Image: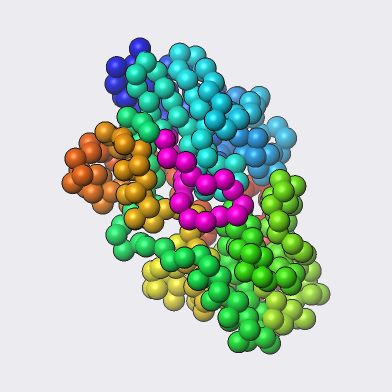
Amino acid sequence: MAARASDLLTLTPQGLYCPGGNFHVDPVRPVDRALITHGHSDHARAGHQHVMATAETLRIMRVRYGEDFAGATQEAVLGEVLRVGEVLVTFVPAGHVLGSAQIVIEQGRCRLVVSGDYKRGRDPTCLPFEPVRCDVFITEATFGLPVFRHPDTAQEVAKLLASVRLFPERAHIVGAYALGKAQRVMALLRQAGYAEPIWLHGAMERLTALYKDEGVALGDTPRVAAADRAGLKGAIVLCPPSAIQDLWARKFPDPVTAFASGWMRVRARARQKGVELPLIISDHCDWDDLCRSILETGAEEVWVTHGQEDALVHWCRTQGIRSKPLHLLGYGDEEGDTATEGAAEPAAEPA
């Protein structure tokens, strides 16, 4: 029986490890058994002998890495309690991207929740985050500073559509991470009443097709061919963030460059990257939602994995919650301006 959380989950060079279940959570190096929270490449890597994840995450990994991305796979059904070795494991929605899940680990009277990446904002493309009461909550802190307070996504989508109406002669090139963010932007545009085709960079195609196969309504999303670009006045085009500065983007008619990311709250970053229309749309919690989520778990102890760890640890301690930073390495921010695709996906289009 695990008397302490530190007995239930420990740190190794591969990442978080559960001795009682003999598995790692989102390991950064190949391991024998991995439990994966979601399909972003900083959490879901190829090469493990055994992978347990939700059905959607397993499909995403096959699209990104190929059918043989792991020796064997096991589908985790949300809400179903599974015994793995000496511990009980449950996958619970995280609200981050399609298929994303928190992982609940229980042994004896100790319950620990690994959040993975998560958000509380509205997203038509995935199930919402479900708070789980626990003893220890292990949380990310990508936007773990009080300065980060995300606006309503409907407001940001309205900004994009207003710009399209104001500049009908210009193409709007929107940089967005190809897993989750791009599909969320498409779905929000549809909910806002935008019925025109939403054009895609080739690197967006396969994951967008997967979302459609999972029943997410995204409408008409044709791929941009080289011959199409000059004629796409007034169109909305989605591409990986790195492509908005490429020659590829400059071939469109007088393009308006936009970038959908929580980092667009930092104006200097938008200016540095030449973003004309910053869209503050994040798939991570802002400061208020991080604090709210921690309180809703009722956790007596909080471990912070990556991001702005120190500020969130300090806040927890002011609330009487024991807290510590884990300083995990290998977890980047998929919203960053260099984020593109997994290794199996095309990252560039002909200029």
Q: Is residue 248 magenta?
A: no
* Quarter where residue 160 is shown: bottom right
Q: How is the image coloured?
A: rainbow
Q: Does the magenta portion include 121?
A: yes
Evaluate whether residue 26 shows in this view.
Answer: no
Residue 253, position as x, y percentages in the image: 69, 83
Q: Which residues are magenta?
A: 114-132
Residue 38 is left or right of residue 147, and the answer is: right
Q: Please name whichever residue, 121 or 311, is drawn nearer the observer in this view of the structure.
A: 121
The residue lying at 52 percent from left, 17 percent from top is 83
The reply, left or right, for residue 323 in relation to residue 186 is left
Q: Position of residue 78 (x, y in %)?
A: 57, 33
Which residue occupies the foreground of this view, 87 or 257?
87
On screen, residue 299 versus residue 165, left or right, reads left
Q: Quadrant of residue 10?
A: top left
Q: Does the rendering let one see residue 229?
A: yes
Kindly give the residue lying farthest to the right in the view shown.
Answer: 227
Q: Would you place residue 185 above or below residue 46 in this image? A: below
Label total for image = 0
* Residue under the image location 42 percent in, 53 percent down: 285
> Residue 226: horizontal and vertical position, in percent?
78, 72
Q: Main secondary structure of the magenta part?
A: loop
Residue under the image location 49 percent in, 14 percent down: 85
Closer to us: 237 or 190: 190
Q: Which image quadrant: the N terminus?
A: top left
Question: Where 223 falls versus 333 (above or below)?
Answer: below
Place of residue 28 in the rendered image (x, y in percent of width and height, measured from the top left): 48, 36
Quadrant of the image for the C terminus?
Answer: bottom right
In the image: residue 181, left or right of residue 346: left
- Residue located 53% across and 67% down the image: 154
